[in-house]
Amino acid sequence: MSDNRVLRMGMVGGGRGAFIGEVHRTAACMDGGVRFVAGCLSSTPDKALASGQDLGLNPSRNYATWRDMLETERSRPADDRIDFVSIVTPNHVHHEVALAFTRAGIHVVCDKPLVHTSAQARELVEAVSAAGTVFAVTYNYSGYPMVKHARYMVRSGEIGAVRKVIVEYNQGWLAGKLEETGQKQADWRTDPARSGAAGAVGDIGSHAEQLTSYITGLEISAICADLTSFVPGRRLDDDANLLLRLTATGRTDEARGVLIASQIEIGHENDLRIRIFGSTGSLEWRQEEPNLLIHRPEGAPQRVLSRGNAYLCDAAKRATRIPPGHPEAFLEAFANVYNNAAVSIRAGRGGLAAPDEFDFPGVIDGARGVWFIEKTVESAASSAKWTTASFVR
């Protein structure tokens, strides 16, 4: 198998009216290592076929249902069938589709959150382990170069032992009842049947949890959560405020954390930010200014590190395409997740151990994210101060 062959991608979801589908297609194919060749782009057969026609899919690979796509692609010669499927549907569809393709031996890239329940997540973990396939979850913010450099600095001890993390994901787009206007993204994200047990926590809080773990290597051991639905009649939370305790294998102490995930903060667009405070310094990164990383060492002036420079770590350099001073952001970060998963596919390195080596979020990260959502909802419903939330692999 060639180390640089172009991979064939299929897609489930992401048709007419879907924002995220075009993002995934653009990102996956950005660097020429992937080609979009097949799809079932909607749960409605007529819309699926029309969406594929819009995008110029070959009629023989433009499918009315994902089951047709799976069976037909499996029957194709190995050098012609899809190498992987990208799943960009609303959350409630993820489990069945991902499980079927994994069991068929086809690699999967799945949007987050992974599935609705921990039981579904465990079933996927077991399936990936048995199949030995690659399974990536598109927590795209871990694809930013300066996030990778922040991870390098923390893991290298440049800010000492992590004591506290403050991570916020601030949005205002759901401050009113947008779901009643027919807006597609608001409609399914506020519907428990399609979105799952949580609203803002599942949609954007899961990103905040993964970003914290990715950079620091710490995982949540306990949660004290307050979830609110500020918009009258809304069935899922639109604002979340969490206190966290964070730990890692080999640590006897616990760091402390604060996590905010809100979609009713008027004036905020896509304001994901993280501050990490260690025993000898701190770091700060913002998604809306993603090419900069602020380092504040103890007893020394603040430093502003910039994407694309030679002083950055190798992982940040590999994730960079253009010289410093030119904006490089959201689509490119998504592309880095796809590229790293593609490297793993070409190398034949799937299963549960591959993601750390190839630097993309895997099925374990997705399962931990589902556990986080469940424990947050449990904590918010409890009168106890702390809910134990240690994720068991």
Image (spheres, helix red, strand yellow):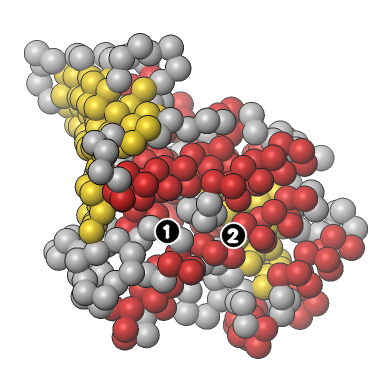
Instruction: Give the position of the C terminus as an image quadrant.
Output: top right
Q: Is residue 102 left or right of residue 125?
A: right
Count residues near mark 1 (Cα–Cα under 10 Å), then give few for <14, some for 14-19, many for 20+: some
Whether pointer 1 and pointer 2 mark residues with C-beta atoms closer than 8 Å, the reply is: no
Local secondary structure at mark 2? helix
Is residue 166 depicted above or below 205 in this figure? Answer: above
Residue 377 pos. (x, y %): 36, 50
Res 23 visible: no
Kindly identify which residue carries mark 1. Answer: 197
Residue 87 pos. (x, y %): 60, 60
Q: Nearest the camera: 221 or 139? A: 221
- Mark-to-mark CA distance, 1 and 2: 15 Å
Please give the name of the residue rendered at 62% of the width and 77% of the height, measured from the top-left corner. Answer: 43
Q: Give the image quarter of residue 279.
A: top left
The kind of residue tagged 2 is His
Label at residue 273: none
Residue 157 pos. (x, y %): 32, 14
Kindly identify which residue carries mark 2. Answer: 94
Please give the name of the residue rendered at 53% of the width and 51% of the height, measured from the top-left corner. Answer: 117
The kind of residue tagged 1 is Ala
